[in-house]
Image (tube, coloured by chain):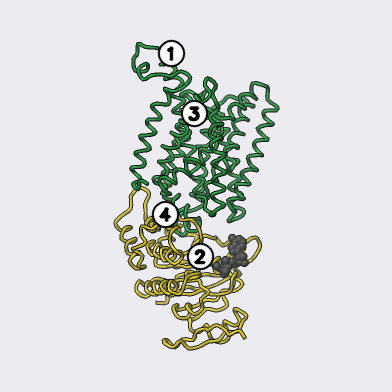
């Protein structure tokens, strides 16, 4: 076990850089470094690289980072690795908002932010408000109850989404379904500009609140007694998480389990001190989703598997492993 | 010397319509060692949680140094008052030293790193509680007694003049229990800290604290010098059972001995 947390961060950064450099070269069409660097050679490959692969890898990285720190934040607030925006229904709320937008189809943007992102944000907010109210009305609501509530919220929004699909025409319905599986194949640079503000604001807030997250990990009563203004801090954290989750989901769909696996493994690697944990989640979460996306391109090429399918295939067993582990010793984080 | 620290007036608090504190009034004097005793479910934990604003009672007032509690920011409050919660099996994912450093939170500002003052406070807290050897241990690997001592160390590191403890020695063996009270006495006498300790151990309350308050059914039934509690059938009335007292051979205070069951 490496003791020095900064060394761990540097090592993972190097790994992430390697992943970032190699991933755009891999795919249906393998691209060599040479064909990108040499301006006279192979224009098509250069185009594929710069116009398609690079934005795709970048957005996968950004999304992975954002999902990982959102998951980390929820896990710390609820003191349980199973409690993430995805399992508690925030993602399905965002998905509902985004699907509604596809159906309503009014193309608009507010202050340059795409309508789909705004709708996803509002959907995420609905879920968060439900979770928030639930955790408020009954103090000391157990995480088990919260997770069941999350299941209910998921069902609720899934049926809404089904209904929207039902009343949509075939094209709309297909585009909603494809988007629900999560993936990066249709993204371009404009999508990055679209969601970057959400993610930058959200993650900056969480980085600034890492000491508060450390205290929350000790339990709410202790956090309060140490001087944390609990409601205020929790509201800000909920807000920051909704920003990031909805930003990601509106563009790439509800990609599940990244926000559960990455922060849990990061905790095992670097410990619970959020001043380091946040950064490991950013680096590891980004690299992890880029890897998953690369897998999705090559596993059964030329067919691309939606990346959400891959993360769910990994995440399902992981979820069950966590459940078994936690029922053994009552400690999930 | 007899300045009032907490002035609690007509405090009422309920959980889901169940009244837990019932128009409770109590003054806590500065630099006193106060023990709060009383039957299970009487509202002791609820009361101390109100004092540090974990709960915000809708009815009644709490003044801290004559200032209404709700006028004081949570950070400012934490600078003055430390809290040692009831022992729990919770996961604390930090080493003892990290745990003590986190107790310095009310003194940290967002843009500066840990100061020499913070480090000094943490070192001192380890020294006073004789827990230097535990500083690099992970909290989850500590025994109950060790963990409790680290919690007291954290309360000291936090730096306030008031320490509120909820059943600090329950579940501990006699040695650890004694160590805890020895340290509480020491910081009370040497550092003039106000100690408010919820306990079921009436003998410890009599022997180590200056004052005792009895909390029953959400009301204060008795408040007075700790040696007065054995008089006038006060304990009998509180717990609805017979008590037998003897004089402690070394200090002449009246303490309880267990009843013989025939
Ligand atoms: N979070 C809670 N929700 C509902 N009832 C509670 C809660 N905490 C305490 N109570 C109830 O309030 C009463 C007083 O509890 P407490 O203050 O813990 O008593 P004590 O510490 O004196 O044993 C008890 O009847 C208890 O069941
Ligand atoms: Mg209690």
Which tag is nearer the camera, tag 3 or tag 1? Answer: 3
Q: Nearer the viewer, residue B14 or B65?
A: B14
Which tag is nearer the camera, tag 2 or tag 3? Answer: 3
- Kindly identify the residue that appears in the image at 47 percent across and 53 percent down: A229
Which label was assigned to residue B94? 4
Residue B143 placed where, x, y %? Answer: 44, 64
Residue A274 placed where, x, y %? Answer: 42, 47
Pointer 1 indicates a residue of which chain?
A
* Location of mark 2 (residue): B86
Which tag is nearer the camera, tag 2 or tag 4? Answer: 4
Q: Secondary structure at mark 3?
A: helix
Q: Secondary structure at mark 2?
A: loop
* Location of mark 1 (residue): A44
Mark 2–mark 4 distance (CA, rounded to whole Å) = 19 Å
How many dots with numbers?
4
- Kindly identify the residue that appears in the image at 41 percent across and 41 percent down: A280
Residue A326 placed where, x, y %? Answer: 54, 51
* Location of mark 3 (residue): A293
């Amino acid at each position: 076990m490496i003791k020095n947390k900064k060394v761990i961060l540097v090592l993972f950064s190097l790994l992430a850089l390697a992943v970032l450099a190699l991933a755009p070269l891999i795919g249906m069409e393998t691209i060599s470094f040479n064909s990108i660097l040499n301006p006279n050679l192979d224009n098509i490959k250069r185009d594929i690289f710069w116009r398609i692969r690079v934005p795709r890898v970048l957005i996968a990285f950004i999304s992975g980072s954002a999902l990982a720190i959102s998951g980390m934040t929820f896990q710390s607030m609820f003191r349980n690795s199973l409690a993430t925006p995805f399992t508690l229904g925030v993602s399905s709320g965002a998905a509902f908002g985004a699907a509604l937008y596809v159906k309503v189809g009014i193309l608009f943007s507010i202050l340059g932010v795409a309508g789909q992102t705004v709708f996803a944000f509002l959907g995420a907010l609905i879920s968060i408000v439900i979770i928030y109210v639930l955790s408020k009305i009954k103090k000391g609501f157990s995480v088990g109850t919260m997770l069941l509530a999350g299941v209910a919220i998921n069902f609720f929004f899934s049926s809404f989404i089904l209904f929207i699909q039902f009343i949509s025409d075939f094209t709309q319905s297909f585009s909603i379904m494809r988007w629900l599986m999560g993936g990066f194949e249709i993204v371009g640079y404009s999508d990055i500009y679209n969601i970057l503000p959400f993610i930058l604001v959200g993650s900056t807030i969480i980085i600034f609140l890492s000491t508060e997250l450390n205290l929350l990990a000790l339990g709410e009563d202790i956090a309060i007694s140490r001087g944390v203004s609990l409601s205020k801090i929790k509201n800000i954290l909920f807000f920051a998480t909704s920003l990031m989750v909805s930003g990601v989901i509106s563009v790439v769909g509800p990609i599940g389990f990244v926000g559960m696996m990455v922060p849990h493994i990061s905790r095992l690697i670097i410990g619970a001190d959020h001043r380091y944990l946040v950064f490991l989640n950013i680096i590891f979460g980004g690299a992890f989703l880029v890897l998953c996306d690369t897998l999705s391109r090559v596993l059964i090429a030329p067919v691309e598997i939606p990346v959400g399918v891959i993360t769910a295939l990994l995440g399902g067993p992981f979820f069950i492993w966590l459940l078994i582990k936690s029922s053994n010793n009552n400690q999930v984080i | 010397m007899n300045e009032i620290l907490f002035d609690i007036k007509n405090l009422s608090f309920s959980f889901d319509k169940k009244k837990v504190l019932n128009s409770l009034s109590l003054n806590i004097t500065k630099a006193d060692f106060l023990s709060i005793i009383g039957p299970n479910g009487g509202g002791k934990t609820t009361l101390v949680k109100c004092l540090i604003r974990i709960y915000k009672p809708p009815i009644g007032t709490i003044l801290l140094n004559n200032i209404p509690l709700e006028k004081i920011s949570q950070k400012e409050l934490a600078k003055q008052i430390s809290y040692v919660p009831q022992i729990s099996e919770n996961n604390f994912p930090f080493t003892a030293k990290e745990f003590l450093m986190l107790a310095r939170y009310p003194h940290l500002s967002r843009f500066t790193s840990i100061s020499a003052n913070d480090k000094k406070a943490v070192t001192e807290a380890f020294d006073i509680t004789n827990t230097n050897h535990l500083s690099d241990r992970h909290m989850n690997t500590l025994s109950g007694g060790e963990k409790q001592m680290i919690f007291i160390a954290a309360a000291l590191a936090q730096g306030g003049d008031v320490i509120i403890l909820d059943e600090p020695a329950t579940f501990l063996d006699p040695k650890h229990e004694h160590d805890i009270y020895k340290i509480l006495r020491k910081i009370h006498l040497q550092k003039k800290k106000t100690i408010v300790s919820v306990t079921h151990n009436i003998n410890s309350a009599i022997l180590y604290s200056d004052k005792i308050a009895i909390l029953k059914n959400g009301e204060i039934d008795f408040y007075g010098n700790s040696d007065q509690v054995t008089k006038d059938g006060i304990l009998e009335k509180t717990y609805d059972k017979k008590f037998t007292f003897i004089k402690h051979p070394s200090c002449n205070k009246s303490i309880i001995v267990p009843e013989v069951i025939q």
